[in-house]
Image: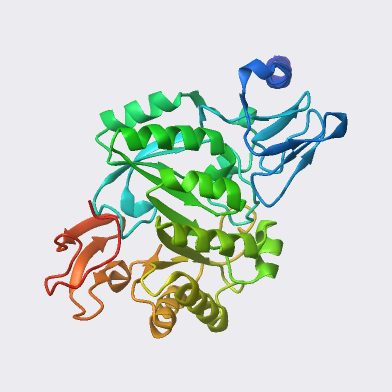
Amino acid sequence: MLNSLKKFFAGIFLILIVASTLYVVIHREKIIRMEEDPSQFHEAMYYDKLLGNMVQCRLCPNQCVLAPGQYGICKARKNINGKLYSMVYGKIAAAHIDPIEKKPFFHVLPGAKAFSIATTGCNIQCLFCQNWEISQVFPFDAATQFATPEDVVRQAVLSGSQAIAFTYSEPVISYEYVLDIAKLAKRAGLKTLMVSNAFIEQKPLKELLPFIDAFKVDLKGFDDSFYHKLTQGRLQPVLESMKTIKQSGVWLEVVNLLVTNQNDSDEKIRNLSLWVKNNLGDDTPLHFSRFSPQYKMLNVPPTPEETVIRARAIANQAGLKYVYTGNIVYPPGEITYCPASKEEIIVRQGMFLASNGLKDGACSDGEKIPGVWN
């Protein structure tokens, strides 16, 4: 009797597995068929039509050449019948209200709330990505909620946020959506923040910048071999993007994630720091962040905390005025000091503001601290 019951329940369990698998396959195929209807999607900007209904995307340095039905490397842009479409326009995969310090922005509206949103996709493939569940998948492989640009701005205002942050995944690949939201946000009196790898071509970058208030660039490493090996990207376009951002007057902060035994040598840290000073200015905030095992690098140990602390010291010695640390408990790395007086003018505790002594963007002795304060 007991064996008969075991066989019965085993059979039921097998049927449920088969049924659920069939449902997933049929549901996914239904979504894919829906994607062949161009009226469901937003035509992309920055692409060329080629012979045979081929297209070439001109948004980022990948320059993907796509046959009909093909997605770009970013998994967010697709050739449908000889036209390139954004498959993520209006499809929000993540939305949260964050302290602005979490982005991290340390010289932008201290203590403010940022209405943070993301779509799926990314134009590079970091082996250490912390948001890979949305950044490394197709739009039909993640739960999303539709929201028009007007919806996003309305929700940001209702939430009491002072800014909208395009973050978590790579906002460049949802370019059209970001641009439309940013334009509306500016009219509504909200600041707009890009948290990006800056892997973008110059023309679309320059068109976007007038509608962005602050840009945080994740500079993955400071040699092309690191970019190629661990991100499938390239360094030089990122360096050019940062110079363009700085020259435009849009506020820029740079973050370098120190990956154990990959980009954390003293020489690489010093070279990166000197490049920032010589090309972006000694008043450009530079954040060094601690790596923890993620995604396809679970076998790599976390960065020693002393490495992050040492990186800050090296950057300070190189002449940078505002150097910070992240993902470790190290109070000096969370404080903004007045360069001349060494006064602790903005004090943070982790991702939260503890005190802000700035008055009209200046220290008590009148020394100005650059940033977006109003």
Q: Position of residue 143 (x, y in %)?
A: 54, 28
Query: Is residue 147 shown left or right of residue 18?
Result: left
Q: Nearer the viewer, residue 38 or 220?
A: 38
- Counting labels gives 0
Q: Position of residue 141 (x, y in %)?
A: 63, 30
Q: Position of residue 329 (x, y in %)?
A: 33, 67
**Quadrant in the rendering for residue 20:** top right
Q: Nearer the viewer, residue 292 or 238?
A: 238
Query: Is residue 22 shown left or right of residue 361?
Result: right
Note whether residue 60 is visible.
yes
Q: What residue is shown at x 64% (from left), y 35% (from top)?
A: 76
**Quadrant in the rendering for residue 86:** top right
Does residue 82 lie above or below 98 as drawn?
above
Q: Position of residue 62 (x, y in %)?
A: 71, 50
Does residue 205 lie above or below 24 as drawn?
below
Q: What residue is shown at x 61% (from left), y 45% (from top)?
A: 122
Q: What residue is shown at x 81% (from left), y 28% (from top)?
A: 68
Note whether residue 23 is visible.
no
Q: Residue furthest bottom?
A: 317
